[in-house]
Amino acid sequence: MWSSGDVVALRHLNAGRPSHIWPMLVVEDSAEVIALYIGTGTPTKRRATLDGIPLDRALSYEERYRVPWRLGDGAWFGSSCLQLHKPGEPRAWWRWLDGSGWYVNLQAPLRRTASGFETEDWVLDLVVAEDGTWAWKDEDEFAAAQRVGRFDADAAAAVRAAGEEAVVTIEKRSWPLDDSWDTWCPDPSWPVPDLPEGWDVV
Ligand code: MG
């Protein structure tokens, strides 16, 4: 288990290859919760073309799926964010610290690695406003991911089920949408972290 203040690598795999790697500060690592923090502007590694240009949403999902890629430099452009995981559960609850609600990232349950954690993004997500209203996000990309064969029918059903389970939580406003994490803020002494050694070792 990691300790509060440790810097770990959170690695997202795409078809078995690390495609997004973020340095995260550990807030809590226990049997109940794995809580990780990333601040706006934190340098990351991310999927890029062979020329080093970030592979972003200017390309369709199908194009991004086929194009050769390598890792390039990136940064966390979103608002500073607390990412909460129940060990073994297929989602991350991202709490935007600018008060703009939550993002529910559907993903493989976190696995432990020598340098931190690893998961695989499942494309489909949910967004939750402060008032608890919610919506699916990236349905179109999820449909495209099924067309290109990234998810077969069973895998796609499991992703949808992981989302439906999150909807139950959202509608009941149970953990973590109760007030458990409402007053949390990052330790002001924490530096902007670099990726820890071994972040690239699969
Ligand atoms: Mg996602």
Image (cartoon, rainbow, N blue to C red):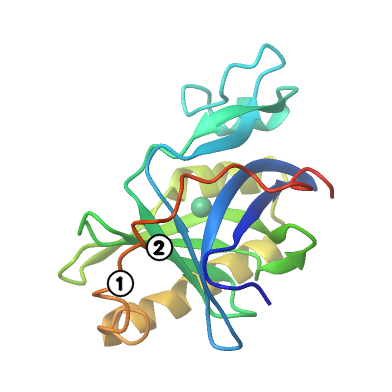
What numbered label is drawn on residue 140? none
Q: In terms of sequence position, does the residue under pointer 2 or pointer 1 come before the other? A: 2
Q: Position of residue 109 (x, y in %)?
A: 65, 71
Q: Are marks 2 and 1 in contact (CB under 8 Å)?
A: yes
Which structural element holds mark 1? loop
Type of the residue with mark 2: Leu
User: Can you identify the residue that label 1 sits on?
Assistant: 184
Q: Farthest front residue?
A: 189
Q: Farthest left residue?
A: 131
Frontmost of labels 2 and 1 is: 1
Q: Position of residue 164 (x, y in %)?
A: 45, 75
Residue 69 found in image quarter:
top right
Q: Residues within 10 Å of mark 2 (few under 14, many from 20)?
A: many
At a point 20% along the width and 68% down the height, the residue shown is: 133
Q: Position of residue 158 (x, y in %)?
A: 62, 71
Quadrant for the N terminus, please. bottom right
- Closest to the observer, 192 or 172: 192
Query: As displayed, is residue 87 above or below residue 39?
Result: below
- Closest to the observer, 24 or 156: 24
Q: Farthest right residue?
A: 202
Type of the residue with mark 1: Trp
What numbered label is drawn on residue 82? 2
Query: As displayed, is residue 118 above or below residue 12?
Result: below
- CA gap between label 2 and label 1 equals 9 Å
At a point 70% along the width and 22% down the height, the residue shown is: 67
Query: As displayed, is residue 192 above or below residue 57?
Result: below
Residue 115 found in image quarter:
bottom right
Which structural element holds mark 2? strand
